[in-house]
């Protein structure tokens, strides 16, 4: 069955790229489509000089349940090329990322790779940049 909605949504808000894991019925569990979508979003973030920061959030009630085990047992692997699991653990973005378990606050806090606000969620693993 093919989902009608993309597994990952992106939205530009001035210099911010909001990246939303969009599988609320599966508690935003990471499958191959999510990994590829996050990797593509990070490529967009890094490749556009007009973007300064990324915010990763989840649709619905939860941020991310971790790996989609139902997909995994069928042989699906949630890795995306050299970016690794979830499209982020092996090679993150070169620009700062905020992991926002709830809807993005307004106004968006500023952060850099050394700020305490920039922390990966356990679902997505450690950032490898910085």
Image: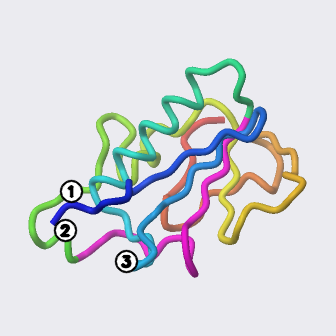
- Highlighted range, magenta: 53-69
Which of the two residues, 129 or 40, is positioned nearer the viewer here?
40
| Dot 2 or dot 3, earlier in sequence | 3
Q: Position of residue 3 (x, y in %)?
A: 27, 62
Disc 3 and disc 1 in contact, CB within 8 angstroms: no
| Dot 3 or dot 1, earlier in sequence | 3
**Disc number at residue 9?**
none
Mark pair 1, 2: CA separation: 6 Å
Toward which corner of the image does residue 83 lie, by quadrant?
A: top left
Per the image, the residue denoted by label 3 is: 26
Residue 68 sits inside the magenta stretch: yes
Q: Is residue 93 above or below residue 69?
A: above
Disc 1 and disc 2 in contact, CB within 8 angstroms: yes
Between tags 2 and 3, which lies in front? 3
Q: Name the residue at 74% across, 41% down.
A: 13
**Disc number at residue 72?**
2
Per the image, the residue denoted by label 1 is: 77
Q: Is residue 118 left or right of residue 106?
A: left
Report the colour scheme: rainbow
Residue 62 sits inside the magenta stretch: yes
Disc 2 and disc 3 in contact, CB within 8 angstroms: no
């Amino acid at each position: 069955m093919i989902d009608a909605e993309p597994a990952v949504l992106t939205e530009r808000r001035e210099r911010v790229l909001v990246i939303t894991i969009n599988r609320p019925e599966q508690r935003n569990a990471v499958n191959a489509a999510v990994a590829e979508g996050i990797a593509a979003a990070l490529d967009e973030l890094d490749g556009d000089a007009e973007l300064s920061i990324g915010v990763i959030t989840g649709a619905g009630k939860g941020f991310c349940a971790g790996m989609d085990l139902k997909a995994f047992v069928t042989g699906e692997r949630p890795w995306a090329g050299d970016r690794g699991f979830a499209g982020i653990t092996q090679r993150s973005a070169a620009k700062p990322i905020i992991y926002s378990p709830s809807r993005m606050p307004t106004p968006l806090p500023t952060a850099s790779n050394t700020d305490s606000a920039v922390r990966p969620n356990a679902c997505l693993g450690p950032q490898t940049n910085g």
